[in-house]
Amino acid sequence: MFASTLNGQRYVFADLKALLARATPARSGDELAGVAAGSQAERVAARMALADTPLRAFLAEAVIPYEDDEVTRLIVDSHDTAAFGPVAHLTVGAFRDWLLSDAATAESLAALGPGLTPEMVAGVCKLMRNQDLIAVAAKRRVVTRFRTTVGLEGRLSVRLQPNHPTDDPSGIAAAIIDGLTFGCGDAVIGINPAGDNLASVTDLLRLIDDARMRYAIPTQSCVLTHVTTSIEAVERGAPVDLVFQSIAGTEGANRGFGIDLALLKEGREAALSLGRGGAQVCYFETGQGSALSAGAHHGVDQQTLEVRAYAVARAFDPFLVNTVVGFIGPEYLYDGKQILRAGLEDHFCGKLLGLPMGVDVCYTNHAEADQDDMDALLTLLGVAGVNFVMGVPGADDVMLNYQSTSFHDALYVRAALGLRPAPEFEAWLAGMGMIDAAGRISPPPRGAPLLDYRP
């Protein structure tokens, strides 16, 4: 039991799960689940109690029982007690103070990561202002490598997302060429297929690989199909670079995606067997609210469950992790303010756990949000050192029917913050005559072969 007194009233929280839920900033998903604080006063009281809670308490009490959930078992069994040692004596509030101090360097944060559980990280996140989330995340660089190197200081990569409502090769090819001319695609060229059948997925993989090989583009491809389809594509000899899967923070929610940890391991091993790049061959996507939408939240708040999903990702040494922050809808993140906060939370928590975090700065058309809200979040994430963002033609995904960030948005944030593409990709852009010494992107010269590409 946890308790605190505020303005003469005593507030009691039955367990760690309830304490974390009541301390969470207001959001529609927790209200929908019935776990949110009943008032702002209760929320403040919960944060007071949480600040006084020892970090060791998170090792003694699981928000979802060990016996009931394989994600809990993964978290407990993989915890590094030696790495935890430097902060083991701290409360959650004192841990926040340490993270904001000069003692929390990039090196010390990297060493600490394996010693932190998702619940510890979710807990300290709930005590932090937006500027705190940005300041700490900016210290932590997580660098991954395939054909490009993503996450380096002073760099911002972009996933080129050339989706098409019918998987038309010409439409997809046009979007790829458009994105490349804006300097996008150094994180991955990643297609959400309209159809999840093996033949269509294989055709899309070959389309990207043909363009990549023809113009010697240093990037990687991914078709965001189910991991079982990727495994079958590998077995059929398709050019699979990265294996994709949506993941969540509970065993039940992952079961709703048709996966478990063993299947994710099989998918990673299948991609590694092809030897097409480095050892980091997984691309995972997450989003606050997925466990609730699957009816598998166990009464845990959605932000804590989101961070538990990062424990799943961490176990497979991914190349990219992307929180699709506003995609699930206003039932979970109601408006621009809630989406902005969630994006900063997810990025901070993922980085603290050692993940190469990207954010799909996005919203659905029925949310109380607009592109000005996304501009603000994109800028803040750029300051916070996000590894990558999305590049969608016109910011309007015509297949998934949601609003994201455009190729122009990537140009804006790179220029405003002095950020550049991944070094290998930047060298390719220079060789194609599309970037100058100052990092300014310009269209390819007239008659450039890239512009004549046909699939």
Image (cartoon, helix red, strand yellow):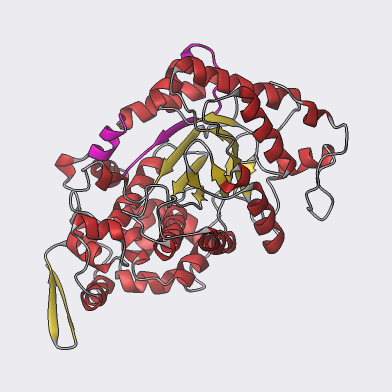
Q: How many marks?
A: 0
The image quadrant that residue 186 belongs to is top right
How far from the left and from the top, in percent, is residue 330?
A: 35, 55
| Residue at x 38% of width, y 48% of height | 287
Nearest the viewer among 149 and 113 is: 149
Residue closest to the far top? 236
The image quadrant that residue 1 belongs to is bottom left
How far from the left and from the top, in percent, is residue 263?
A: 34, 26
* Above or below 334: residue 207: above
Q: Where does the magenta region start and end?
A: 234-258
Nearest the viewer among 402 and 111 is: 402
Q: Say left or right for 24 vs 204.
A: left
How far from the left and from the top, in percent, is residue 215?
A: 76, 27
- Asked if residue 117 shows in the view, the reply is no
How far from the left and from the top, in percent, is residue 178?
A: 70, 38
| Residue at x 49% of width, y 51% of height | 362
| Residue at x 41% of width, y 33% of height | 245
Nearest the viewer among 299 and 20 is: 299
